[in-house]
Structure formats: structure tokens, C-alpha cells
């Protein structure tokens, strides 16, 4: 099945008890058993729920994976992956990560004896240098948040396989419409479903997709034992959102391109980060592994200190100043004070997360209105 058909149908059959075409919201915590242990496949909704199950099968299909697991947030999904590790294990990861990923690695799992190496992965060969007998996992994000670096998934997949490391790819920024890491050698794909997959800024959710049955069993055990699983109402909302994922992504990419091109020559814009430009340092890798370049764009403002950046960030009328991304509405984010506040100044500035950086999540409104808004705010 092709992507658009999977987005609309995967995991979803007419409901066996009524024929309802849309998956019902099974708002129940528990299930009847004929006699102890004899049930219809569902026992207790922390572990299994039919609405969530339909969603998980759909999520797996979108990433060309066998198994899907939904979590109550992207961080809940990340937490479950890290619990595959034991004290003494080491993880290789990128130097430009979602702030919350950096925070859970350094402030939570480092305390449990797991060691993280934050590296510039633009040359994947660096992984070999940092791999030793304790290294168990490579965790990457691409495009990175917020500076849109592109990491070569296939090249890292090859090294990971050779060194027997799990490769986890946070595919939130690309969405499964633009990029499928399982096809490029990933062991696990992670998503903040809150963003493009949900797509309407009304649900917080995370997901893991994978092929390995053993690993799926271990992750399902963690999911059920630790309990960061989403409820049926949220699962329903995401199933509904996914049905237009392909249409939304096309529109995000179209609008993103128009806006990136407008900003590239704007006198108030200093640097611009968008992988669709031919002079982006990893453009060739982006072209190879992504179907299009998406609607996430970051810019630095010319001659702007923090106060001036704040003034501009607050003067948009169609773009909403808010954290998060990937919804139908355009959002404007100031990473230093919002999403990346938990990363120390010297660490973030090294990769370009500076005071005058703004990150745009270009929505699917009429692009003329978005251009007009940028013109007046940057004016
Ligand atoms: C938002 C985000 C997360 C965290 O997901 P939540 O759903 O907010 O918990 C992880 N990675 C990336 C790239 C994100 O943008």
C-alpha cells in the first residue's frame, strides 16, 4: 500500500461489534473475562486498548515497520528506549538535539550510570572513534532542532550494524511522509506524535516503531511496567489527524519553500537554516534521504540583541508565538528562552542556538498571509 492509503486505512477495520467505520473510542480501563485468563485479547488499558492498538498498527505502517508502540508523550517514548540500557552502557548522540532529549540524557539517565557522547555527526566516521565495548546505542535526530543539520541515516546505519549498536532515529521533524529511517538501517524510529503526525496541536503523544520482535517484547514490557501509555481519546484524535498527514505535509513543504526563499534575501535575516537550499552543507544527504525539505526553518536576525529579538518575536499576527511545531497553524519559537532553555549557554551557542535565533514552523495557511505577516514583523 502507498503512503496516502496507509494514512487513511492502516490498522483500521470496521468495528467488529457494530460495523462503525471510524475506530470507536474504547473509553474503558478494564475488560470482561469469561474465566480468569480467558479474555478477548484485552485485559487492562495500561497495557492494551483497542483504540490505541488501531493507532499503533497505523503508526507502524507509516514507518514501514512491523510494530508500533504509542506513549503518552515523545519523552515517554524516549524514556522507554533508555530503559533498555543498564548502568555502564554508553550512547553516542548528536550535538544539536531537542532540548528535552538533552535534558533527559544529562539530568536523568546520566544519574543512572549511562554515559552520553554528544558529537558532530556530520562525518559519521566519528562514531568509530567513540565506540568501545560499553557502547550500546546511537541516538540521532535529523533534521536537527533547531539548526536543521542533516545526518546521514544510511551511513550511520551501516556503522551501527557493523559495531552491533542499536540505531534510534528521532524522526519528528521530517515525519514519516518525508523520511523513513527503518528503510535506511534504523533499529527503532521515535516520534513526538504531538508534532506533524498529530498535526493539530491538540494532543501530546509519542511513538516507537520497529521490526525486531525481541526488542518489541522488551519495549512492550517497559511500556506496560512503567505505564506512560496514552488514553483512548487521544489515540482517536491522532488516528483522525493522521488521515490528512500526506495532504498537510505537501502543503507544509510548499509553503516552507516559498517562505525560505523569501527570508533568504530579506535584509533583516542574517543566517537561514533550511535543508532545501543547495548551499546548505548537507543538502545532498537531505536530497538522498528525504522526499522533500519540510516546513521547519530557522533564522538569525541581523543586528538584533535579545530585546530586539523578543520585540520581533512578539509582533507577529498570523504566526503564533509558542513552543511546539508541526500543527496546521504557523508557529514562531524562540529556542533560547523556550524549547532549548535547559541547554547550557556555552553548549548551545557552539551549534548556533544563539539569542537572536528564531525557529518557524510554517503551517498550511494561505502563504500570501504568512508572507505579509513576516514582512510587517521584520519590517
Ligand atoms: C517535541 C519533541 C520531542 C518531545 O516530544 P513530546 O511529545 O513533547 O514529549 C522529542 N524530539 C523532538 C525532535 C521534538 O520536537
Image (spheres, rainbow, N blue to C red):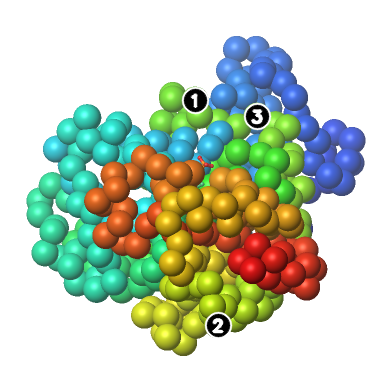
| Label 1: which secondary element | loop
Mark 3 vs ligand 1: CB below 8 Å: no
Q: Quadrant of residue 205?
A: top right
| Label 3: which secondary element | loop
Residue occupying the point 30% across, 31% down = 108
Disc 1 designates what residue?
A: 227
Given residues 301 and 368, the one toward you in this image is 301
Q: Quadrant of residue 378?
A: bottom right
Disc 2 designates what residue?
A: 265
Given residues 201 and 48, the one toward you in this image is 201
Q: Is residue 1 left or right of residue 337?
A: right
Q: Is residue 343 left or right of residue 300?
A: left
Residue occupying the point 69% across, 61% down = 363
| Pointer 2 with pointer 1, Cβ within 8 A | no
Residue 290 can be seen, yes or no: no
Residue 231: image tag: 3
| Pointer 2 with pointer 3, Cβ within 8 A | no
- Residue 54 vs 161, above or below: the answer is above
Q: Mark 2 packing: few (<14 Cα in 10 Å), some, or many (20+)?
A: few
Amino acid at each position: 500500500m502507498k503512503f496516502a492509503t496507509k494514512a487513511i486505512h492502516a490498522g483500521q477495520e470496521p468495528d467488529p461489534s457494530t460495523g462503525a467505520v471510524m475506530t470507536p473510542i474504547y473509553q474503558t480501563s478494564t475488560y470482561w473475562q469469561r474465566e480468569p485468563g480467558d479474555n478477548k485479547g484485552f485485559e487492562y488499558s495500561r497495557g492494551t486498548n483497542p483504540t490505541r492498538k488501531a493507532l499503533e498498527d497505523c503508526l507502524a505502517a507509516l514507518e514501514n515497520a512491523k510494530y508500533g508502540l504509542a506513549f503518552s508523550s515523545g519523552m515517554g517514548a524516549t524514556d522507554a528506549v533508555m530503559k533498555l540500557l543498564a548502568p555502564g552502557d554508553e550512547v553516542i548522540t548528536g550535538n544539536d538535539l531537542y532540548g528535552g532529549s538533552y535534558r533527559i540524557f544529562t539530568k536523568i539517565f546520566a544519574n543512572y550510570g549511562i554515559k552520553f557522547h554528544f558529537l558532530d555527526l556530520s562525518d559519521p566516521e566519528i562514531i568509530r572513534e567513540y565506540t568501545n565495548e560499553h557502547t550500546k546505542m546511537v541516538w540521532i535526530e535529523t533534521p536537527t532542532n533547531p539548526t536543521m543539520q542533516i545526518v546521514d541515516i544510511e551511513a550511520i546505519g551501516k556503522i551501527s550494524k557493523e559495531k552491533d549498536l542499536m540505531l534510534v532515529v528521532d524522526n519528528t521533524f521530517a515525519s514519516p511522509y518525508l523520511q523513513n529511517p527503518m528503510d535506511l538501517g534504523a533499529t527503532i524510529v521515535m516520534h513526538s506524535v504531538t508534532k506533524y503526525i498529530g498535526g493539530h496541536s491538540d494532543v501530546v503523544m509519542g511513538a516507537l516503531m520497529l521490526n525486531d520482535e525481541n526488542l518489541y517484547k522488551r519495549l512492550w514490557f517497559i511500556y506496560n511496567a512503567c505505564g506512560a501509555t496514552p488514553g483512548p481519546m487521544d489515540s482517536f484524535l491522532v488516528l483522525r489527524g493522521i488521515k490528512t498527514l500526506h495532504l498537510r505535509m505537501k502543503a507544509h513543504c510548499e509553503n516552507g519553500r516559498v517562505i525560505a526563499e523569501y527570508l533568504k534575501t530579506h535584509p533583516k535575516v542574517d543566517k537561514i537554516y533550511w535543508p532545501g537550499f543547495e548551499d546548505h552543507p548537507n543538502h545532498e544527504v537531505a536530497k538522498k534521504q528525504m522526499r522533500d525539505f519540510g516546513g521547519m526553518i530557522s533564522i538569525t536576525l541581523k543586528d538584533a540583541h535579545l530585546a530586539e529579538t523578543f520585540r520581533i518575536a512578539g509582533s507577529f499576527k498570523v504566526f503564533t508565538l509558542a513552543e511546539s511545531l508541526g500543527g496546521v497553524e504557523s508557529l514562531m519559537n524562540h529556542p533560547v528562552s523556550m524549547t532549548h532553555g535547559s541547554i547550557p549557554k556555552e553548549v548551545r551557542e557552539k551549534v548556533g542556538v544563539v539569542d537572536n535565533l528564531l525557529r518557524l514552523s510554517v503551517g498550511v495557511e494561505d502563504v500570501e498571509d504568512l508572507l505579509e505577516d513576516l514582512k510587517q514583523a521584520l519590517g
